[in-house]
Amino acid sequence: MAIPPTSGNSTNVGNMAMRRNGADRLFWPLTFVLALLSIKGVILLLSVKHTSVSSSQPTNSSPHQFSPSPMPQKSRVAPDSSNSPPPPLHFYVVGDWGTGGHDQHAVARAMDAHARHSPPQFVLSPGDQIYHAGVETDVHDPILPDRFDNVFTRKYERLRVPWYMTLGNHDCMGNISAQIAYTQVSKYWNFPAEYYTIDLPVEPSSRDGYPKVDRPASVSNTARIIVLDTCSLVCCADGSKAHQNAKMDFRCDPVIVDNLKQNYDVDARDKQLAWLDRELAVPATYKVVLGHWPVFSFLGNGPSSRLAAALLPRVRRHGVDVYFSGHDHGLQHIHASEPRPPRAPSLPEFFVVGGGGYPLHAKGLKPDADRSTNHLARPRFAHAMFGFADVKVIAGTMHVDFIAAANGSVVYSVAVPLRS
């Protein structure tokens, strides 16, 4: 005998049927959506495979080629734009700084503060980057970042521009090759060789925007900066028998002389002077020479008669506008006033910028300084003080300001007409 279902059971069965019918109604649309997604996935997979295959075919650019990213604007000399000319050339000069001490840090702070309203495009360093006796080991010597990166470029963003280095007498006591090799380690340290040339565009059509080391000499509308190794010019023999037994300059420490003898060719000085003649002969809008030892000086070690004999005829003949140096610890502008024949080229202006942080030469010339060369010149400014030079070239005139590290003030300013 069949048992009739109760109303409750009848209600449960009806509810189950309703749930089943609802599930059926949801199942088919869901199945349809899943099918569509599967079809799209197959199409997408085929599309990806097709792209992968096509990229392996020869194209206009090899998969191994790449376009280098543009240099950060702070590291460039001119904006990378075809619609605007390069800005006026603007750089700092600071030498004799590599102590890692309080006074070097004070100069770095002053440079950073000044750069807030007068940012340089690059910095020239006339030597003595590493006191007291240069780099003792190799390119990995911690003294290199300690004296440069940690003081200037890691600490101050506005000083993260190219720095161009020169050999000073203290640098020549150590491993010279290590300082040159550090160019490959430090982003902002540039020291390609013991002596080298930098050419900078000074015409609106130039778009280089960055100092190029040893740029082709065919470019004539340039500012040419020639960086010397004055260690060899002052302390190396010149190949003549007369000089073999000549008395060395008192600045030529025996450590320097021995180091040069071990690492330089016998005719290194003659080779550099021949190179200098070639570089000076290249046409340029204006020419600047950078070296460590000064030709004239009224502080500290004083002038170098041997350097003067080598450089003065050359810089006069080739129309050099300015000679920047360091070595004597202070700030000097010296004007050469020696007599010359009518219409003969004048000598350049001489700036000694050695106030980067080493103890100052506060008592004038040393007793053993060779004063004989100074009769050809007179100082327009000569003070034992920490600081640097801010240099701008605008409309054929080089404006040089000496900036005191103590308070950031402009203590001396001069405008030098360029021969262009």
Image (cartoon, rainbow, N blue to C red):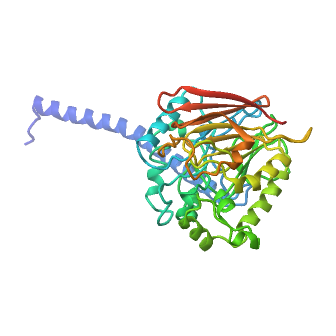
Decide: is 267 above or below 322.
Answer: below
Does the rendering let one see residue 211? no
Tally of numbered tags? 0
Q: Quadrant of the C terminus?
A: top right
Rendering quarter of residue 159: top right
- Can residue 80 be seen? yes
**Residue at the spot 57% in from the left edge and 63% down from the top edge:** 176
Q: Position of residue 111 (x, y in %)?
A: 53, 35
Question: In the image, what residue occupies the spot 47% across and 35% down?
Answer: 109
Name the residue: 65% across, 65% down: 247
Above-or-below relation of 239 to 384: below
In the displayed structure image, the side of residue 337 where residue 108 appears, left or right:
left
Position of residue 187 relative to residue 406, above or below, is: below
Q: Nearer the viewer, residue 318 or 39?
A: 318
Residue sitting farthest toward the right: 342
Percent position of residue 292, x then y: 63, 51
Which quadrant is the N terminus positioned in? top left
Q: With 126 as the anchor, is 148 left or right in this view?
A: left
Give whichever of 274, 108 is nearer the camera. Answer: 274
Estimate the x, y position of residue 408 in percent, counting from the top left.
51, 28
Q: Residue 205 location in percent, x, y?
A: 82, 37
Residue toward you, 140 or 78 = 140
Residue drawn where x is 76% and y is 56% of the image: 310
What is the quadrant of residue 382 in the picture?
top right
